[in-house]
Amino acid sequence: MNISYPNHGPMSPMQSYSNVRAMDTDEMPRKKLRAASKMDTVSVLNEIGISSFQNGDYEKSELCFSQALCRMDVDQLVGHMESKVSKKVSNDFLNLMLPNGDSEDEDITGSESRTDYDEGMRVYNGPLQLQDNFSQDKAAPTLAYNIAQTYIHRGQSRIAKSWLQRALVNIQSGDSSIASLTVKILNCLGYCYYKVGNDEKCLVLYTQALSIVVSNNLGNMYLAPALNCCGVVYFNMEVCNANKAMELFCQSLEAYRAWSTLDLCSIGTVLNNIGRVYYLQKDFSDALQIYQESLNIRKVLLGKDDIDVAATLYNIGQTCHQLGKLNESIKHYNQYVEIAKEVFGEDSKDVALAFKGIAEIHHERGDLEMALDYYNRAYEAQSASCGDFSADVATTLNKMGNLSYEMKQFQTAMKHYQQGLQIESSVLAPNHPHVIITLTNIAHIHKQMGQHAQALEAYKKVLKMQKKNVGEDAMQLAETYSSIGLMQYHMHDYGSAFESYQVALRIRRENLGKDDHQDIASTLNSIGLVLFKQEMYELAKKCFHESLRIRTKILGKDHRDVAILWYNIATIHFETGEDDLAVRMYKETLRVEVAALGADHPDVALTMQHLGQVHQQLGKIEEALEYFKDALAIERKRKQSKTSTLGRILNLIGNAYLQIGATEEMMECYIEASRLYEANANRTPNETLVIAGYNFYALSKTNPPCSPVA
């Protein structure tokens, strides 16, 4: 997601009134001031408030504005307010309606969830002067607006909102200056709602402001920012309306460019917003072009170290990443980091975002160590800025767990996942999807480590959460049922495994509405394996044949997954003594594997071993030896071949030589096989030399380990 920053336009210079003291209420003269004298005091207090505001003393500024408001004719002011409320604030030029259900006493719920990264929302970010010969009707809403500004800058949106609503109540119909003041009040009130993510009320207010601008013909100075603000809200709504946002941004850009006083800084802001829409629409080439135009403007106007420049650098980094320009992406991310560190500090969530972007690039390049290093930097920055118990921290821990998983560092991956799960369980709602993902990853690690009971327990927890979230028959439950079935299969609980796979098959058929689907074929294959273990060979064979039919139809006859089905069917024929059928189907398996995987793949070696065993059982020892030797040659070429695998094949060759009485060759094979078995520190009790006829080994096809959930 793109990050962006507000336009920090310079405020108008104000004359200093440091020589005038703001009086407390108790110090005011008891007698009623002359009207002119009273209004002069109001004007002076307002100017002092503006000066204090510009110096960053918001408390003093608020005090001055409040004193100025108190010096207005209170009786007339209160009477006017009551009259306005009774009339529902209806007049000729303004049909103003605060968002439904809103009241002055209503709190703005939620925290300041949005930072100032969304472009151009704080157009009116300072107090206003009182014009010469101002009237009380204009002064009261202006002063209330100015008080609200002090609270906005102090991050107190609730109080600011209350003052802005008071300002609206005091608005009367009048000239264009009243209309422009109304627009500014509505804009700031909308911003208060925007800060806490209340997009519905926010959009109502910004739309009202835009309507007033158009109906009163206030010109491009007001039209351009009003269009941009509406566009930003449409862009950031929970369901983004990218087309509407783009339409408004383009109109805003046109209005800014048509404005007689060319505001290049705001043009750079709107260009950045347009780039964000292009990015969201995956139009990365146009996004990059627009971002570059925005960057050029911002560098000239703001300087190369400004945070708005940094925001566009980050956006360019993201876009280059999507376009595969990885070096360019890293360069822009690093430029962003250098600026962001100076503004936010090294340990900020903003810096962490860039570190995560760089980590993703290194991950894609296969440089897992470097990727892990950058994820760790992101984790440290997020922990320092957000605290250890943050959803962002948990997400980064999940990424670190995924990398450790890929690196076969299962213990480290488990540590990251469990730490992330602890955080997610504390900060997220029960059964949150992120909790389910992390728990699934933990189950995967238990599975990879052969801890089937622990994996089964974790998968069952996942299933329980999923049922509460999406019901009993949702498609995602099928995958979990399959994982549960696999663990039960490994634990030799074949009855339970069969039931789990049957549920998975039913859910998939109901959701897909057809049998000719990869997931259906996979589930049928799993059911066939369970039936095979229970020696229900005919039923197993039916499942394998149906799975074979589906996969051949979808994938073609020369796909690796098709070869697995031929292999399983051949093994059933081998087990039931149908050796000729077994040979024919193992040969078809071998043909498909060579076509799909190449002649030197380990699956090819396994099939050759089975072909050798079938020929050995048929008494065709010479042919059996040829297959065994071909399998041995393949394994010796592989750098990652296990010593136990080489030992087993040599053992098979030795036994074949024993059958034909070739004792010298037999002894050479036995000696080397024995040495390899002994060299394997992690060998199982079954990995030992077998000297007698031949031994059928439970060989299984190699399959890639399941990946962690992203």
Image (tube, grey):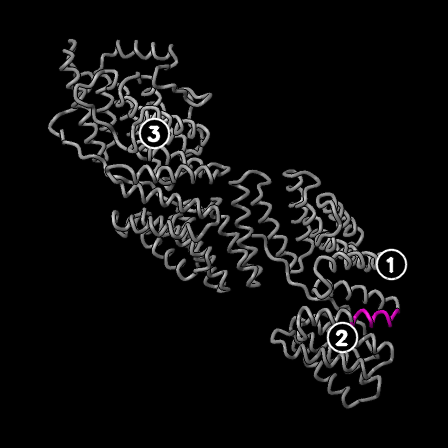
Can residue 530 be seen at all in this image of the molecule?
Answer: yes
Cα–Cα span, label 3 and label 1: 75 Å
Which label's residue is closer to the chain start, 1 or 2?
A: 1
Q: Is residue 584 magenta?
A: yes
Q: Which residue is at the front of the view, 571 or 510?
A: 510
Locate residue 196, reporting x and y percent: 42, 33
Can residue 124 be seen at all in this image of the molecule?
Answer: no
Residue range corresponding to the magenta coloring:
578-587
Quadrant of residue 590 in the image? bottom right
Q: Residue at x 64, y 73 (%)?
A: 681
Q: Residue at x 30, y 51 (%)?
A: 296
- Which secondary structure lies at badge 1? helix
For mark 3, does the 10 Å Cα neighbourhood hold few (<14), some (14 to 19), or many (20 or more) residues? many
Q: Which residue has dot 1 on it?
A: 538
Locate residue 523, reporting x and y percent: 74, 53
For mark 2, does the 10 Å Cα neighbourhood hold few (<14), some (14 to 19), or many (20 or more) residues? many
The amino acid marked with disc number 2 is: Gln
Q: Is residue 259 above or below residue 491?
A: above
Q: Which mark identifies residue 188?
A: 3
The amino acid marked with disc number 3 is: Cys
Q: Residue furthest left?
A: 19
Quadrant of residue 492 in the image? bottom right
Which label's residue is closer to the chain start, 2 or 3?
A: 3
The reply, left or right, for residue 195 in relation to residue 612 is: left
Cα–Cα span, label 2 and label 3: 77 Å
